[in-house]
Amino acid sequence: MTTEPIQTRDIPDHSDILILGAGSAGCILANRLSADPARQVTLVEAGDFPTDPDVFDPAMWPRIQRRSYDWDYRTLPQPGTANRVHHWARGRMVGGSSGLHAMFHVRGHVSDYDRWVAMTGDPGWSYDALLPHFKATERYAEASDLHGTEGEMPILIPDTETHPLVRDYIAGWQELGLPRLADHNGREVIGTAPNSLMIRDGRRVTTAEAFLRPVLHRPNLHLLTSAEVHRLRIARHRVTGVEIRTPDGARVLSAGQVILSLGSVADPLLLMRSGVGDGQVLRAAGVGCVLESPELGRNLHDHMLGAGVVYRAREPLAPSRLQHSESLAYQSSRGLDVHAGAPDIVVGCVVAPSVSECFPMPAAGETYTLLFGVTHPTSRGELAITGPDLRDAPRIDPRYLSTEHDRSAFRSALGRARMVGETAALARWNGGEVLPGPDLRRADDLDAFIARAAITHHHPVATCAMGASERAVTRPDLTLRGLDNLAVVDASVIPAIPCGPIHAAVMAIAQKYASDLDA
């Protein structure tokens, strides 16, 4: 499919629905909500359709980060990770972060969504209630009670493409007693399997390619690209206008219903620039408070991975035919004989060297990496604006590894990575541990290594978390408390992170919101 930008029509000043952000949620919303020809829908995006072919080459992940189509946010130095600054890749393109992420498709465990129900008081957020919405976005090769085949996003379950090293890695977990699963989108996720991937014919598929391009011909759907959203105009508990900056100058757009789908970083920043948030934080940034929302930008949490347990390969490693990180193994730190319930740690196999910036990068083809991480971190951070303008750098403080739970779980995950690395199934590949090094065994030394090895998995959530409490930023129906015509639909509303990558959940959230709006 061509990656050339599409020429867009004249954009109306007023629409029925105005969607801010053409990312993983925004493209689905534009597709679903413009299906009604009587409804005028406008979609606004700061970037454009990507023309860099590397975006669509799975093997180029993650080297496409920090290019012109990445917002490349940066955190404050993190005491829990050796005072390092972490780069947060966020897509600045039509398709958003679905053009930068690792292409994994993992819904999470049933109990993840039980937590959402408990936090919102709404049974509509249960796994079973969301299942039709998951399936409505998916296109698996074979249908089942849990897999959809009629959706737009192709989901590949690798078979012959799986690297020989990864086949032996999966066998190593089986040797240790961990179940072999068909995939990680069943009711139980503890076990090992090849990663389900958003790849078709050897190419990355973004939400823009799957959901948006096929419907851009609709006369009631308007796409404005290269347009930065600066501020919301708010009066009488409504968004009365949206200030947009384009190469042709400033504009103000309006709509009966405004939807924020800018992501977990940009949503709260826009709201804060518009006078929504903690009044003290806003005043410090030179912004008057229009609407108090003290939890906005708080509850921030993210998945991290230790990069990693690196092994020297005993024989040359051919490159992955997929995207390097080919298999995840979810498990319980209580024991490898625990095969049901929520996992709390994860180990992944990367057919390449993978290390943080603290370590020299080993040679490709000569090493492989076992990543390790925590599925449900308890560290909570926050983000905030530092000034009234879009150009003012945000203050992002995830407070990584600030709880003993997270540090202890990371040590357990590191131990499991080493355990599988030493199995008989991987003996043909194992030429010796390069990192952290076979002599590193004491808990404090392991903690020091983890602090230097931990990297973001790029899954920030909860900065506009939905909840039943009046303090929650968004209601269970995703409307923003205090504003009558504004909803937030993306990862920022997730109140508690699922065990796996969040993209599948974001697609289901968008599908559910659109379905509920049309009901």
Image (cartoon, rainbow, N blue to C red):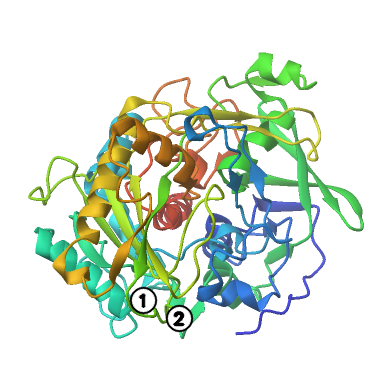
Q: Which residue is mark 2?
A: 200
**Number of numbered labels in the structure image:** 2
**x then y, percent, for residue 27:** 57, 62
Q: Is residue 470 left or right of residue 21?
A: left
| Marking on residue 434 | none
Residue, disc 1: 156
- The quadrant in which residue 132 appears is bottom left
Give the left or right position of residue 300, taking residue 442 as reference: right
Q: Given the image, on which type of amino acid does mark 2 rest? A: Arg
Q: In the rendered image, is residue 298 in sight?
A: no
Query: Tags 2 and 1 in contact by the CB under 8 Å rule?
Result: yes
Identified at 28% across, 81% down, the residue is: 159
For residue 60, which quarter of the picture?
A: bottom right
Front residue of this view, candidates 160 and 177: 177
Q: Secondary structure at mark 1?
A: loop
Nearer to the camera, 198 or 80:
80
- Density class for disc 1 (Cα within 10 Å; few <14, some 14-19, many ≥20) is many
